[in-house]
Image (tube, rainbow, N blue to C red):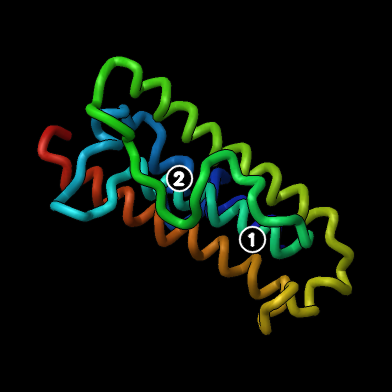
């Protein structure tokens, strides 16, 4: 059921509407880089943030060391870097692939967990593995909705 929940939130058919991956489908680098206001996150940053938290949850579940994420830093990553230009489309596509890759790695880690581990607290936290997994599914859905809203607010839809 936990695997089904994260899949429905990320890329499987679900009753609630667009999934996280579905929400970025067809978005260009220019659309992903648009900000609704000063110091507000854009679609691109939300996408990389979601990838980071998939990594962080996997790390919590497996005990993997910090520092193995593809980008330096944590939580929020400034995107795009530099003035938006022709090369940014490739950067956007790479960051969407990063999100997909982190989901696949998280899914594999969850599938490998023994059932008895689901009700144990994750390392250094008071929450169980099952609670943490349900939380990352909710995180995906929250940000899928946020991205859908940012797409609707974009002045050149």
Q: Residues within 10 Å of mark 2 (few under 14, many from 20)?
A: many
* Residue under the point 48% across and 34% down: 96
Q: Quadrant of residue 126?
A: bottom right
Q: Report x, y in % for residue 77.
A: 40, 47
Helix, strand or loop at label 2? It is helix
Asked if residue 28 is positioned above or below residue 7 in the image, the reply reads above
Q: Residues within 10 Å of mark 1 (few under 14, many from 20)?
A: many
43 left or right of 1?
Answer: left
Q: Residue 85, how many percent across, how many down? A: 25, 20
* SS type, badge 1: helix
Q: Tell me the residue that label 1 is attached to.
A: 57
Q: Residue at x 85, y 54 (%)?
A: 112
The furthest residue to the top: 86
N-terminal of the pair, mark 2 or mark 1, is 2
Q: Position of residue 140 (x, y in %)?
A: 49, 56
Q: Which residue is mark 2?
A: 48
Q: Is residue 117 shown left or right of residue 149?
A: right
Q: Residue at x 24, y 43 (%)?
A: 151
Could you tell me which quadrant the N terminus lies in?
bottom right
In the image, residue 22 above or below residue 93: below
Give the total number of marks visible in the rendering. Answer: 2
Find residue 118 and report its image quarter: bottom right
**Picture quarter with the C terminus:** top left
């Amino acid at each position: 059921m936990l695997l089904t929940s994260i899949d429905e939130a990320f890329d499987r058919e679900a009753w609630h509407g667009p999934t996280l991956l579905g929400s970025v489908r067809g978005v260009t680098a220019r659309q992903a880089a648009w900000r609704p206001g000063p110091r507000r996150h854009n679609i691109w940053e939300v996408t990389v943030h979601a990838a980071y938290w998939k990594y962080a949850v996997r790390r919590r579940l497996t005990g993997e060391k910090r520092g193995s994420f593809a980008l330096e830093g944590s939580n929020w990553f400034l995107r795009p870097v530099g003035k938006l230009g022709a090369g940014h489309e490739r950067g956007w596509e790479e960051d969407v692939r990063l999100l997909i890759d982190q989901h696949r790695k998280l899914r594999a880690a969850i599938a490998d967990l023994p059932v008895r581990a689901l009700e144990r607290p994750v390392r250094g936290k008071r929450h169980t593995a099952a609670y943490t997994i349900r939380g990352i599914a909710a995180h995906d859905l929250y940000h899928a909705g946020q991205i859908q809203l940012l797409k609707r607010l974009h002045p050149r839809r």
